[in-house]
Image: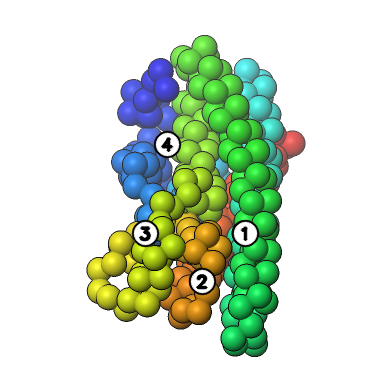
Amino acid sequence: MATSYHSRSNSLPSRQHPLAFQIDDNLSWLRASEAVSTSSSIGHKVNGLQDLHECVDMFLQLPLTQQALAQEQHRKCAEELLDESLMILDVCSVAKDALVQTKECTQELQSIFRRRRGDEMGHLNGVKKYLTSRNVVKKVIMKALKNLKQMETKFNTTCSNNGNENGAVISMLREVEEVTIRVLESFLSFISGSEAEPKLSRWSLVSKLIHHKRVGSEEDRKTNEIENADATLRSLIKSDNIKHIEYVQNQLQKSELCIQELEQGLESLFKRLIKARVTVLNILNC
């Protein structure tokens, strides 16, 4: 962005209020964490985003903040932020649906492996169905990511053109939305996993499946459990060998646990985003 939060902070209403410092700290931490994208880091980012929006909602309750937002010259910008927040909520809904669909397919495939022991054709059909579903999920996510990129481009252009005219509160809210967009981009990219196909020969995969308990294997060191499960299943189809499925089941279990944790964090974030949006709506309608 053309300007930073620090360059505007002295003009914020209630600048000495602890919430202003908390928002500043949360923004700084989230920006610093952008480069890392493991399951643990994604969870921490979502939690950090929850904390940020909780602070913002409390900051919006301050009389001086509400007075600033209610000023006529800021109304248009505030309404634009509301439109953008609605789009962000739509993206959150896409992410929630993607997690639900992936979890359901993961559970269904695990059930097939348990119920149809020795039925290789049934196992292969189950894996193909899972991968087909994941491809559908990825297409939806790619579309959502494209929308976020377009929103971010428009957002940055608006901020660059009007950075000195928006007023401190509006500028701060824009920075919050910018960071929110970036975290959601990271979140969606994590759910979609890598598009790269693993380059494993038939025999290297069989060896990996047989010796999956070896400590420190390449797959086990990866940190995207959803991607690991996808890659393992794609390799399984290529190898045409599914006699050793214990390793596959282990990857699916890890993926399911990861999805459950991400679901919980996203649901809490979704509620906080709605709450902050309602607060701004109430201020503008007063």
Q: Pinpoint residue 198: horizontal percent, then vertical percent.
A: 43, 52
Q: Which residue is rendered at x = 39% and y = 20% of the image?
A: 3
Residue 280 on image: x %, y %: 64, 40
Q: Amino acid at mark 2?
A: Asn
Q: Quadrant of the N terminus?
A: top left
Of the pair 252 and 3, the residue shown nearer to us: 252
Front tag of 3 and 2? 2
Judging by the rendered image, the residue that carries numbered circle 4 is 14
Gap in Å between the C-alphas at discs 4 and 1?
A: 53 Å
Secondary structure category for the residue under label 1: helix
Mark 1 vs mark 2: give the one in front. 2
Q: Which residue is mark 2?
A: 241
Query: Please, what is the three-letter code of the amino acid marked with disc 3?
Result: Thr
- Residue 112 position in % (x across, y down): 64, 80
Distance between mark 2 and mark 4 Cα atoms: 65 Å
Q: Which residue is mark 1?
A: 131
Which amino acid, mark 1? Leu
CA gap between label 1 and label 2 equals 17 Å
Q: Which dot, 3 or 4, sits closer to the camera?
A: 3
For disc 3, the neighbor class at 10 Å (few under 14, some 14 to 19, many from 20) is some
Q: Which of the two discs, 2 and 4, labels the residue nearer the N terminus?
A: 4
Location of mark 3 (residue): 223
Q: Earlier in the sequence, mark 4 or mark 1?
A: 4
Q: Residue at coordinates 49% horizontally, 64% vertically from top-left?
A: 239
- How far is mark 3 from mark 2, CA to CA? 25 Å
The residue located at (48%, 38%) in the rendering is: 182
* Mark nearer the viewer, 2 or 4: 2
Alpha carbons under labels 3 and 1: distance apart:
20 Å
- Quadrant of residue 5 within the rendered picture: top left
